[in-house]
């Protein structure tokens, strides 16, 4: 499948900022499940490419001098392949690295209880057990836009019983790691019209390392593994390590942010 993607992020400040720096993880890499045909990232100021510690293609955007807005525009075409969610073993990073907990994925009473429900299944049949975990998360934590923030932890989302794709991914990571399965956060895009998250083209899910298969994707929000409707952007221990845009600025006062993401299937 060939997907065309347009992703615009527009920041407006109530007063001029003097200096801004942004870390952009907005460039997908080619892999077993996708091939990047064309891609561009544009933003004011200086744009410097780099590869982060997880191997993600990224950019640092720096703007000096007064400015009252920043607009980041990403456009590209990616050819995707349905691999039944299997990426394979080759990655460059040791799987055990992704057993590490973070403040977002720290175990608590609610997440520990959820992990215990599937621990035996995962020990018997890892792949089947993780699919069971995917379903349980979707059952326990209803998808609800704006129900949480980027600061919400997995434990808090389980207790609340509602959240977004970021929360679903964090809960999966917390429980899978508790069961001894290396797992990582994935940011990316999904073709509109898929599952419960159909109105949001930017997406997040998880990948776990399974002996004999390598890295396999799990998307609790849509109760499935990634298909050819998905495009991977970046990986990390959690949202903070794979966030599409992070940054800071000097001055500017209150900011207003608007985002437009469009993913469409195009002819080959």
Image (tube, grey):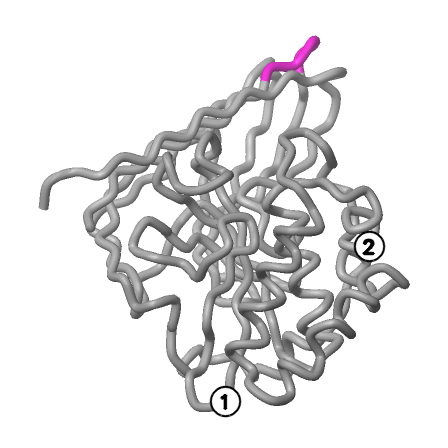
- Report x, y in % for residue 36: 25, 54
| Residue nearest the viewer, comparing 256 with 183 | 183
| Residue nearest the viewer, comparing 138 with 174 | 138
Q: Which mark is residue 211?
A: 1
- Report x, y in % for residue 225: 44, 61
Q: Is residue 55 above or below residue 222?
A: below
| Residue nearest the viewer, comparing 73 with 220 | 220
Q: Which mark is residue 123?
A: none
Distance between mark 2 and mark 1 Cα atoms: 28 Å
- Report x, y in % for residue 154: 76, 54
Verify whether residue 240 appears in magenta. no
**What is the magenta range?**
12-16
Mark 1 or mark 2, which is nearer the start of the sequence? 2
Which picture quadrant has residue 142?
A: top right
Residue at image point 42% right, 44% down: 189
Verify whether residue 15 appears in magenta. yes
Which picture quadrant has residue 263?
A: top left
Image side of residue 160 versus residue 222, left or right: right
Mark 1 lies on a secondary structure that is: loop
Mark 2 lies on a secondary structure that is: helix
Crowding near pointer 1: few (<14 within 10 Å), some, many (20+)?
few
Main SS of the magenta segment? strand
- Report x, y in % for residue 122: 62, 81
Crowding near pointer 2: few (<14 within 10 Å), some, many (20+)?
many
Q: Which mark is residue 155?
A: 2
Image side of residue 118 versus residue 61, left or right: right
Q: Is residue 115 above or below residue 3?
A: below
Residue at image point 51% right, 51% down: 187
């Amino acid at each position: 499948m060939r997907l065309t993607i347009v992703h615009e992020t527009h920041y407006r400040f109530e007063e001029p900022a003097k200096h801004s720096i942004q870390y952009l993880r907005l460039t997908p890499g080619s892999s077993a499940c996708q091939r990047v045909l064309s891609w561009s990232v544009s933003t004011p100021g200086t744009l410097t490419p780099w590869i982060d510690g997880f191997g993600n293609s990224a950019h640092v955007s720096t703007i000096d001098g007064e400015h009252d807005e920043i607009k980041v525009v990403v456009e590209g075409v990616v050819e995707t392949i349905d691999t039944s969610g299997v990426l394979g073993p080759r990655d460059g990073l040791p799987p055990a690295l992704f057993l590490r907990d973070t403040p977002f994925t720290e175990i608590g009473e609610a997440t520990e209880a959820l992990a215990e429900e599937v621990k035996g299944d995962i020990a018997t049949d890892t792949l089947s057990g993780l699919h069971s975990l995917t379903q349980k998360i979707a059952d326990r934590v209803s998808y609800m836009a704006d129900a949480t923030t980027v600061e919400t932890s997995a434990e808090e989302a389980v207790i609340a019983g509602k959240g977004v794709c970021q929360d679903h991914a964090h809960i999966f990571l917390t429980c899978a790691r508790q069961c001894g399965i290396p797992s990582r956060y994935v940011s990316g895009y999904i073709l509109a019209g898929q599952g419960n998250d159909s109105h949001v083209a930017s997406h997040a899910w998880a990948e776990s390392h399974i002996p004999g298969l390598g890295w396999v994707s799990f998307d609790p929000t849509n109760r499935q593994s990634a298909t050819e409707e998905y495009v991977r952007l970046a990986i990390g221990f959690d949202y903070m390590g794979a966030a599409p845009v992070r940054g800071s600025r000097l001055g500017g006062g209150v900011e207003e942010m608007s985002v437009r993401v469009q993913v469409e299937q195009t002819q080959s």
